[in-house]
């Protein structure tokens, strides 16, 4: 058996009217059979107004986050402005090829972001405070959506998101929906559990909190 430390996990991302919410459980397992860590952090900021979730191998996910941060910092240093969400998603897709990681990317575009990496989206089309959510696959594919989930608990989490998602939700309302999705998956998926980490992403930045129980978020 390949004893790889994995975040057999549940991660979700969803858009709100004023930002993006990312959420993930906190359980990491060894070979998918033993709970190796109950406080795993599976959400990582990658620039001032964007973060990613990690599912798959811990090493692959951590390597992916480090490389994406470096590329985002280098871009801002060279161009004097932060990388747009389109550019960040394409960069993430290029980095992830061949890695054992399945990230979700969420963030907020501000005016004057450079969106020229995507055909048909000139720079001056960037909306102020536009929330964006992407799923990135291991082959380098990028898909944008209003909400998405990944990891071993994704099927249960997606069902909850389908039932509760409202495009007119505020960030705080979206936090409750994300917590419901992670809680539902943790009830059925043995690789998910041990609380929840939630990231609220707005034009003001990334604000992240961890809770020992999803009920603390829903209370």
Image (cartoon, helix red, strand yellow):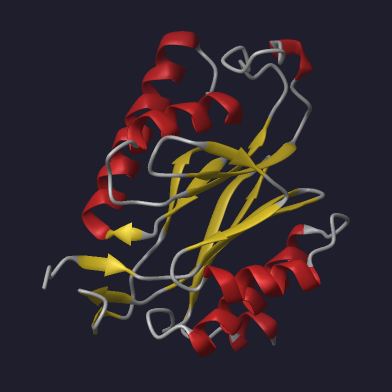
Residue 64 point in image, percent of width and height: 31, 42
Residue 128 point in image, percent of width and height: 78, 29
Residue in view at x 41 percent, y 16 percent: 77
Q: Is residue 178 left or right of residue 64?
A: right
Residue in view at x 28 percent, y 44 percent: 99
Q: From the viewer's perspective, is residue 113 above or below residue 160?
A: above
Q: Is residue 165 left or right of residue 33?
A: right
Q: Is residue 59 left or right of residue 88?
A: left
The answer to whether residue 100 is visible is: yes
The answer to whether residue 84 is visible is: no
Q: From the viewer's perspective, is residue 67 above or below residue 119?
A: below
Residue in view at x 48 percent, y 70 percent: 10
Residue in view at x 88 percent, y 56 percent: 168
Residue 132 point in image, percent of width and height: 67, 40
Quarter of the view holding residue 94: top left
Residue 106 point in image, percent of width and height: 58, 46
Q: From the viewer's perspective, is residue 109 above or below residue 78?
A: below
Q: Quadrant of the C terminus?
A: bottom right
Q: Quadrant of the N terminus?
A: bottom left
Q: From the viewer's perspective, is residue 103 above or below residue 77?
A: below
Q: Nearer the viewer, residue 174 or 202?
A: 174
Q: Nearer the viewer, residue 207 or 173?
A: 173
Quarter of the view holding residue 111: top right
């Amino acid at each position: 058996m390949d004893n790889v430390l994995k975040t057999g996990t549940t991660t979700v991302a969803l858009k709100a009217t004023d930002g993006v919410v990312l959420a993930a459980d906190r359980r990491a397992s060894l070979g998918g059979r033993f709970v190796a860590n109950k406080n795993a952090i599976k959400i990582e900021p990658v620039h001032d107004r964007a973060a990613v979730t990690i599912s798959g191998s811990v090493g692959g996910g951590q390597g992916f986050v480090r490389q994406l941060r470096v590329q985002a910092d280098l871009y801002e240093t060279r161009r004097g402005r932060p990388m747009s969400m389109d550019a960040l998603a394409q960069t993430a897709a290029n980095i992830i090829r061949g890695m054992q990681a399945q990230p979700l990317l969420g963030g907020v575009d501000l005016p004057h972001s450079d969106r020229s990496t995507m055909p048909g989206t000139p720079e001056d089309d960037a909306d102020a405070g536009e929330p964006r959510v992407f799923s990135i696959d291991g082959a380098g594919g990028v898909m944008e959506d209003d909400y998405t989930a990944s990891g071993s608990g994704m099927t249960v989490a997606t069902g909850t998101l389908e039932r509760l998602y409202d495009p007119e939700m505020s960030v705080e309302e979206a936090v409750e929906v994300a917590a419901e999705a992670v809680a539902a998956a943790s009830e059925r998926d043995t690789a998910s559990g041990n609380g929840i980490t939630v990231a609220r992403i707005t034009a003001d930045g990334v604000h992240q909190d961890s809770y020992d129980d999803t009920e603390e978020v829903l209370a």
